[in-house]
Image (cartoon, rainbow, N blue to C red):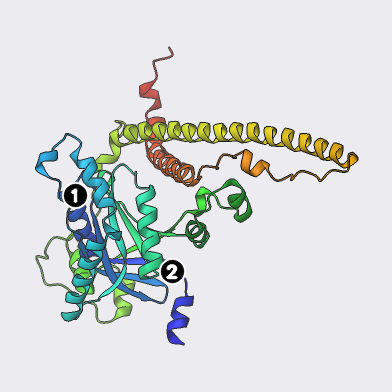
Amino acid sequence: MADATVKEVPLNSVQVEALVVMKIVKACASTFPTTATGSIVGMDVNGTLQITNSFPFPAPDIAASDSHPNDHMAASNIAAAAPRSKANATYQNEMIKYLREVNVDANNVGWYTSANMGNFINTSLIENQYYYQKEINERTVALVHDVSRSSQGALSLRAFRLSPTFMAAYKESKFTTENMQKTKLTYKDILVELPIIVHNSHLLTSFLHQLPTPPAKTELDFPASLADLNKEAPQIPLYPNLDSLDLSIDPYLEKTADMLLDSIETHYTELNNFQYFQRQLAREQTKVTAWKTKRVAENAQRATQKQAPLPEDEWERLFKLPTEPSRLESMLNAKQVDQYSRQVDGFTASITGKMFAVKSNLLPDSQ
């Protein structure tokens, strides 16, 4: 009964230890631009997924004879599929067994992957997370670390899960227009993002609070009680951030805008393919309707001649209707466009404010 009660509590946040964050950042940065993947372990406590350890999967080995300028692309494709490969599944089980022997949390709670410029919404991410949520543990997450964004000075680490609606649709592999209208499935229902909390030990937190303050030159007057400490809170010194005065446009924004345009072009290509299918279907349905009308007229004439009617379902053998292409790729591309748009919106918000602040210096003198 206790296990059933725990499973009923939905996941509402992900708590990651600071050491795990450093491990993920180091593993992803060391293989950049090749995709890095690994496993994360921890436990689920009252709806909060606590991630306490991680380890990377073995890097893909590209033969020297196949050396090519785009070898990192082939390695990225292999690494992206690593979490669900049989070899890495065995490796993961062995590592978890060793962790259990040294009395460390040994419950698999998901996997992590690296990303570049926010480009991570693809088929590999969906297949890997579906494998984890379906086969290993339903309460698992995918941590995505954007190496390019983190290199700008702000840590980019996000946690995602597949929504129950998308899990049901992916299980049936029915991404047709009729099924999506029936289930009201859109690109917004693919992933569910969970907030991330970076957790430190109390000892490390105390050390971090002491870092900005210079060592005391005189004897300190320690508070006698907690009430005295709350009454006279210590003042934290302010340090100016001169980076906020930089007026240059972030190169990350420029690259993101280029990738956004590429995704929009891909969206139009998928749209043209679907429109071609609709034209083909309409053409075949017109032929089927004409054949049925002709067959009904023939049966009416045979009925007047007291002859047996001809079968009216032969059109299924004579005509082959085109199969509707899967709308999964279009949904993933639409989600990626939404991801790029949010990134551009976040960058332009700060840049626009700076431009308005110095507008008088940028515009030519009106006098």
Of residues 299 and 61, which is closer to you in this image?
299
Disc 1 target residue: 29
| Residue 227 position in % (x across, y down) | 33, 79
Residue in view at x 44 percent, y 31 percent: 265
Q: Is residue 71 left or right of residue 140?
A: left
| Residue 320 position in % (x across, y down) | 59, 40
Q: Amino acid at mark 1?
A: Ala
The residue sitting at the right extreme is: 304
- For label 1, the SS is helix
Residue in view at x 80 percent, y 44 percent: 309
Image quarter of residue 138: bottom left
Q: Is residue 64 left or right of residue 355?
A: left
Can you tell which mark lies on residue 345?
none
Disc 2 target residue: 11
- For label 2, the SS is loop
Q: Amino acid at mark 2?
A: Leu
Please tell me whether residue 45 is drawn above or below residue 212 in the rendered image: below
Q: How many marks?
A: 2
The residue sitting at the top extreme is: 367
Image quarter of residue 315: top right
| Residue 355 position in % (x across, y down) | 38, 30
| Residue 8 position in % (x across, y down) | 49, 76
Q: Is residue 300 left or right of residue 153?
A: right
Which of the image's four quarters has the C terminus? top left
Residue in view at x 69 percent, y 36 percent: 288
Residue 234 in view of the camera: no
Give the mark nearer the N terminus: 1 vs 2: 2
